Amino acid sequence: MKRILAIAVITFLSFKASAQDTGTDNHQITVVIPNIALLDLESSATKNFTSTFVQPTPLEAGQKINAPANNSDTWLNYSSILPSTIVLSRRVDVKLNTPVPGVDISVVAGASASGFGTKGTPTSAVTLTATNQPLINSIGSAYTVTGANNGHNLTYAFTAADANYGNLRAASTVVTVTYTLVDN
């Protein structure tokens, strides 16, 4: 009887052991990718700069002042991971806090020569106003690489158009240009 019971227990345990393990197994891994929308301005010098209109030389009555040289020292970098629903793309908007009377300030973004993913497409030059305007469209999940000489090179141009010349006043005016990464 003990022998039969021992054989039954061994047989039962062998079935239970073989039912637990097989030649394969699996487990789940949850991969989390965050929604990212980061923007930064970089420069090899300083991102704050001065642009000065100058008198022509030699000084001669009746001449118009000369506009400052274009400034291309600033680079726009971004990192973007789109959410899985609703947002199809992002864009970069730009605006000026306060226009300078008689002066038009425009900015144009070059194509991004660095980074990977669906980098944005620059618009044509934008004359800055106090209202947000698109500068770079159709940004998907992408990154431009960080730092000066990466991302989109920004070129600023300054003009004192003849039609607005009467609005010019001698002053040193500080303006703030704001870039915003916006969901479309």
Image (tube, grey):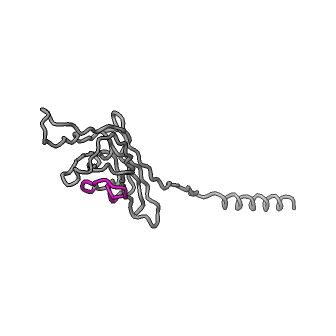
Q: Give the residue at the far right of this rendering.
A: 1
Direction from residue 175 to residue 11 in the image, left or right: right
Q: Which of 132 and 168 is in front in this view?
A: 168
Residue range in magenta is 123-138
Q: Which of 75 and 133 is in front in this view?
A: 133
Residue 108 seen by the camera: no
* Percent coordinates x, y for residue 174 in the rendering: 37, 42
Q: Which of 60 and 10 is in front in this view?
A: 60
Report the number of numbered marks: 0
Q: Give the residue at the far front of this rendering.
A: 61
Direction from residue 180 to residue 50 in the image, left or right: left
Q: Is residue 129 in the magenta section?
A: yes
Q: Kindly indicate the quadrant of the structure image that contains residue 2.
A: bottom right
Identify the residue shown where x is 13% and y is 42%: 62
Identify the residue shown where x is 74% and y is 61%: 11
Q: Is residue 111 in the magenta section?
A: no
